[in-house]
Image (cartoon, rainbow, N blue to C red):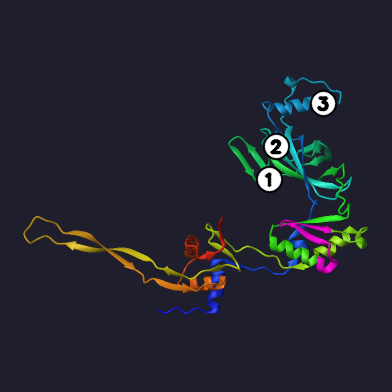
Amino acid sequence: MKKIFTLATLLLYVAITSTVFAESAVTRIKDIAKVQGVRSNQLMGYGLVVGLPGTGDSDDTRQMIQSTVSLLRSFGITVQAADLDSDNVAAVMVTATLPPFVREGDTIDVVVSSMGDADSIQGGVLLQTPLRAANGDVYAVAQGSVSTGGFMAGRGNNRATRNFPTAGSIPNGGIVERTLEDDIGREGQISLSLLSSDFTTASRIANAINAAYGDVAHAANPGRIDINVPGFYRGNVVEFVASIEELPVMPDNIAKVVVNERTGTIVMGGNVTVDECAITQGGLTIRITSEADVSQPSPFSYGTTMITKKASPNAREELSSSVVLPATTSVSDIIGALNAVGATPRDCISILQAMKAAGAIHATLEII
């Protein structure tokens, strides 16, 4: 049967095979670049969760015992480690992310994770825990009731667990104690960092800024654009950055084909082209059928009637379908041609790999 390729067939094929065509479109600078220096910082601390209903650390968790003894001593209570049997206490690590431009007194969310052999920290209360940055300085303090989003019920073999009761969070449980100074444009200059480094995109961003504010920007490298803040905006850098972020620009991307073999998804950039090549797609079908047969013995013999099965193998090779792609073929032509030969998503993946190996496709093939 002759196959007819139409636009409707292509659209249906794209929907079924999860093939996506990605083409560059005009976007805001805000969506492809960020101001250099505006970043978050990770915080970490060690603390104790108390008030657990017997689901805390066992006596084998030495850090919990030592921490409890040290905590009680700070309150003037002297106890021996051997005298403690506190399975309602758990040693935990507390982590948080300090956003940019936060001030003293602002609150942040914290994550609490057991580091001992506690069964659950559900319902526990985190005692005051300093949170430090990589330089060792304390930037926040965390405290509050832990919400795990999971639970553990029962004991021994008759125990049911839902989600992860040994890790939880405290919304707004951290209080910022120290501000990170981020004076953008303090020296009359700011820099933009591209989310994806590219020579062409960096040049286009610099040209768009210069077209709006004069010769104030230049691309230092494919990932950074240095900008001199105009004198009119020296006292209001925030407004200058906001106006830059809204400038339209068309980013450029390298020709790339991304293939997900697990799901059969293919994503191809609109600038993918191929050299002239021929693609052949065919299949071999092997079918084995069995038929019942009666074996009748000769007259006056001592034989018995038997029913046997006769296997009849049948091999059939389907007629292959071929298509020739001319040079400078676009991505839509590639998919249209593959659809014309009846290629499935898995076939498309194999064909694209073969085209790349043959040097016929001009794109980076990435398999995830």
Q: Mark 3 points at which residue?
A: 72
Q: Name the residue under label 2.
A: 114
| Mark 1–mark 3 CB contact (< 8 Å) | no
81 or 229, which lies in front? Answer: 229
Please give the label number shown on residue 236. none
357 or 47, which lies in front? Answer: 357
Distance between the Cα atoms at labels 1 and 3? 30 Å
* Above or below, 29 relative to 104: below
Q: Does the magenta stretch include residue 102?
A: no
Q: How crowded is mark 2: few (under 14 residues within 10 Å), some or many (20 or more)?
A: many
Numbered disc 1: secondary structure = loop
- Location of the C terminus by quadrant is bottom right
Numbered disc in front, either 2 or 1: 2
Q: Is residue 220 magenta?
A: yes
Numbered disc 2: secondary structure = strand
Give the residue type at disc 1: Gly
| Quarter location, residue 189 | bottom right
Compared across the picture, whether 24 is left or right of 228 comes to: left
For the magenta stretch, what is the residue range?
210-227
Give x and y (percent) for residue 115: 69, 35
Label 2 vs 1, first from the N-terminus: 2
Q: How crowded is mark 3: few (under 14 residues within 10 Å), some or many (20 or more)?
A: few
Label 1 vs 3, first from the N-terminus: 3
Give the residue type at disc 3: Leu
Q: Residue at x 51, y 69 (%)?
A: 275
Give x and y (percent) for residue 246: 80, 66
* Above or below, 262 relative to 340: above
Label 2 vs 3, first from the N-terminus: 3
Give the residue type at disc 2: Ser
